[in-house]
Image (spheres, coloured by chain):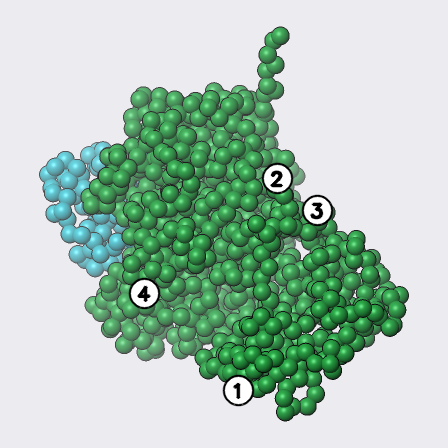
Amino acid sequence: MSPDRLVYMANQIGKFFEYQKANEVVPGIANHIRKFWDPRMRKAIFDYLDQGGEGLDPPVRKALERLKGEAEGKHRKDALPESSFQGT
Amino acid sequence: MSLIQDIDYGTPASKAERQVTLTIDGVSVTVPEGTSIMRAAMEVGNQIPKLCATDMLDSFGSCRLCLIEIEGRNGTPASCTTPVAEGMIVKTQTERLKQLRKGVMELYISEHPLDCLTCSANGDCELQDMAGAVGLRDVRYGYDGQRHPNPGIDASNPYFTYEPSKCIVCSRCVRACEEVQGTFALTIAGRGFDSVVSPSQEQPFFDSECVSCGACVQACPTATLNEKSVIDIGTPSRAIVTTCAYCGVGCTFKAEMRGDELVRMVPYKDGKANRGHSCVKGRFAYGYATHKDRILNPMIREKITDPWREVSWEEAISYAASEFKRIQAKYGKSSIGGITSSRCTNEETFLVQKLIRAGFGNNNVDTCARVCHSPTGYGLKTTYGTSAGTQDFDSVEESDVIMIIGANPTDGHPVFASRMKKRLREGAKLIILDPRRIDLVRTPHIEADYHLPLRPGTNVAVVTSLAHVIVTEGLVNEQFVRERCDWDEFQDWAEFVAQERHSPEAVEKLSGVPADLIRGAARLYANGGNGAIYYGLGVTEHSQGSTTVMAIANLAMATGNIGRRGVGVNPLRGQNNVQGSCDMGSFPHEVSGYRHVSEDTTRTMFETLWGRPLDEEPGLRIPNMMDAALDGSFKGIYIQGEDILQSDPNTQHMAAGLAAMECVVVQDLFLIETANYAHVFLPGSTFLEKNGTFTNAERRIQMVRKVMAPKNGYEDWEITCMLSNALGYPMHYDHPSQIMDEVAELTPTFAGVSFKKLDELGSVQWPCNEKAPEGTPIMHMNGFVRGKGKFVITEYVATDEKTGPRFPLLLTTGRILSQYNVGAQTRRTANVVWHEEDRLEIHPHDAEQRGVRDGDWIKLSSRAGETTLRALITERVAPGVVYTTFHHPGTQVNVVTTEFSDWATNCPEYKVTAVQVMPSNGPTEWQEEYEELTRQSRRIAEPLVAAE
């Protein structure tokens, strides 16, 4: 998976949630990526994050760090507040 | 089985609530006030002779055959134009009436050619029937007076003939064109004996404004307008009611047969989506089902450079299964996936996703809604709680203001467009947001009150600006919002949209829409009564597609235009079963009924019934599948009824992705473009050859009924079962009704759906369950499905697809009336006479600057690629904007479109591509290479002859 494309997609998601309520921004981004991205896409962007994550917008980076922590067992999945954005 | 004869009540039903009782021929009848005497009589089975009357049309009173006597009144009024009255006593058969009717019939017959035995309508002619009904035994005026000089037959239309000498000038065709279709292409030219039906200015049908919907042919009581198929084959002998396989309107048709040959498709009056109307595709364009290009035998090849080799079903299925197993063994469980078809039935779609989730063991399933209405699912589920439109089509009859955003209903959803036009002629107001001047902006008897010709890519800005006007001018329906919506979220939203940067004056600068138009449209929508929004792919196919859907949902909530008849938010779905394929769980993150794969309770329910563990992680979407293929982690795909190579964006990327896979299995009617990269071809069946259901844009589930045996040997669901069995995941169904039973068991919104119920009711709209056993025509009547309606902040984010010196124009794409999607079906019918090629619409100013003349070949280039096609100079597009269709693989316009996509769903941004247009001398290098690839790829090896 090309990191450039994944970074672009993640930042696009971020640009939507950035304008929502402050407490929705990071959970919104994280939940969206968790809900809709195939595990190999998430792994690819976590790897990119490990390499510095250049180009990731700040709230997106935060959301990805949170998700990565979940994947590595550092955080519980339900520790992140549920997003009110329940679109499918 | 026999022909299905619809009862013709002569005049339309009255919608009045007050009932009136009268006596007709001694029988007491109670009917709604406003009903005609003709209809009241028919209600009790008393058919009054008639010629100019039919219940699809308003009464006309011209043939003078339906005369009656009313006690206490003078004369013999026409029963079609005389309304019932309380206590009225009517006689339909007296000596005087008999004589009058015979006299009228004598005049008709004296002017009509009496070639009944060789007439194509013999046995299906109302004139013939009425001559019998009135007891005509003699014609005092002789039989030589053919009224019209015989100008011959107009056979210019590919599907029907016009034979003026057989015309009785009842005007049914003219009225059908006006009242039912709303095109006004026909009129009666001349006077007295010279009266004749005239298409446009006495032109041949083909050259006229006729759109070939067939309403005139259906209305004609004689053989004046007659299907060529009836002339060729003869009259049908049996009929089966089924559902059209073209657009998301979901018209019901009677497939009229003789033997196993389809004679004609006749729109079914009891069809709740189409109410007896049709368009050129559903009515006539079914010839693809028997086209010589259809592939009827399974084929395999090791490499895509090899010619195809016809094999047995067993060998093809076994080969596909062994390849999928090999790939999974080598590259892992997630290395394969599949695509369900929005052209196939719910049952077939359900099985494909079941095969992938339970058989393949992953969630790598997606569907063509990815590239059309996936943002609708996201946007409406987020705001209202349900991934579907809110209304039934009948609702438009109660709309006062209709707002159309990014849709072209007269081309894309023509039968619903006709119903919409009827309401507009009755006085409803019209607002259109579209970069192009679509037909509805100005068409006979209709003119949009506001046309907002926005710059492509600025939907969110303009819709948010409409909200700005509604909020800042105090037009919010506060009572509705307080009762039905989250008030805190509303306040945040209201504060957001009220910001000056969202004012029409500010938005004019980026959208190009004059501020006064935005203000006027917003006021009209908020103040004009029942406001209904209809939208299409011009909303969804953008990088902010989901955001626009939510902005639309916000507008409807703020004005209280949701939860009752006449209002609502209505996505016009593209393909026949897009709604159904989504409902059936075709997306990689959710199972049927829009439940996420990570929900433990849901997954457990499926696992218990299916006997296999399901993956709790979402799978790959179509564009991600191609990325993963190029990345080496996705190696095999099963594609049922979808031509992703032609329909998806950035064709070269798509081609590279497919070429990188080790096993591509295509199940389709034809060797479609995607099949150029396939290793296994499984021939599919048409909608005429299978049983099942489709779900249309109004959530209406309707029966698809088999009218002939599958020419390929199997219905598509049977092929999926065979593949699944070969893969070691047993699937056994005797009939698709059992698959629907399984859907109902697993899906709360479908809990009450069964083939038995559909046979009884004709159709149902989901949710259909214990709470709503006969379905749900209007959603959110007593509150939103999600609880409180959610207002969402919709910040405008400009697309990254920018114009500049290299690519100064904006390309937007769409479709045309006569063609459908990638054209695989319609290009194999006579519909090609209306659209032989894709053309690029370009404004005269832009054309002149580039030295392009109408009809010239031009090169259309973007950052993604380039293609050539011919120019069509027109002011329908604004300066700076060009437009084309995507129906022809020779053009491959998706070579030009980019991979920018909706932030939430990855729905491609087809509607905004920065391009340049230059004169051209011939096809591009890519087109030449692709043509050669296609030629090579479609080679089928001669079967080997066994040695003696």
The subunit carrying tag 1 is: B
Q: Nearer the viewer, mark 1 or mark 3?
A: 1
Gap between marks 3 and 4, in whole Å?
Answer: 49 Å
The amino acid type, in three-letter code, at marker 3 is: Ile
Looking at the colours in the rendered structure, which chain would you say is drawn in cyan? A
The subunit carrying tag 3 is: B
Mark 3 / mark 2, whichever is N-terminal: 3
Q: Residue furthest front?
A: B26
Q: Position of residue B912 (x, y in %)?
A: 46, 51
Among the 4 quarters of the image, the one containing residue B103: bottom right
Residue B722's place in the image compared with B466, above or below, is above
To which residue does mark 2 refer?
A: B290
* Left or right position of B187 against B827: right
Residue placed at 28% from the left, 64% from the top? B784
Tag 3's secondary structure?
Answer: helix
Mark 2 / mark 1, whichever is N-terminal: 1
Gap between marks 1 and 3, in whole Å?
Answer: 49 Å
To which residue does mark 4 refer?
A: B780
Q: Nearer the viewer, mark 3 or mark 2?
A: 3
* Left or right position of A15 against B927: left
The subunit carrying tag 4 is: B
Q: Position of residue B421 (x, y in %)?
A: 55, 68
Gap between marks 1 and 4, in whole Å?
Answer: 40 Å
Gap between marks 3 and 2, in whole Å?
Answer: 15 Å
Picture colour for chain B: green
Would you say the residues marked 3 and 2 are in contact, meaning their CB atoms lie under 8 Å apart? no
The amino acid type, in three-letter code, at marker 1 is: Glu
Seen from the viewer's position, the closer of residues B258 and B865 is: B258
To which residue does mark 1 refer?
A: B86
Is the same chain shared between marks 3 and 4? yes
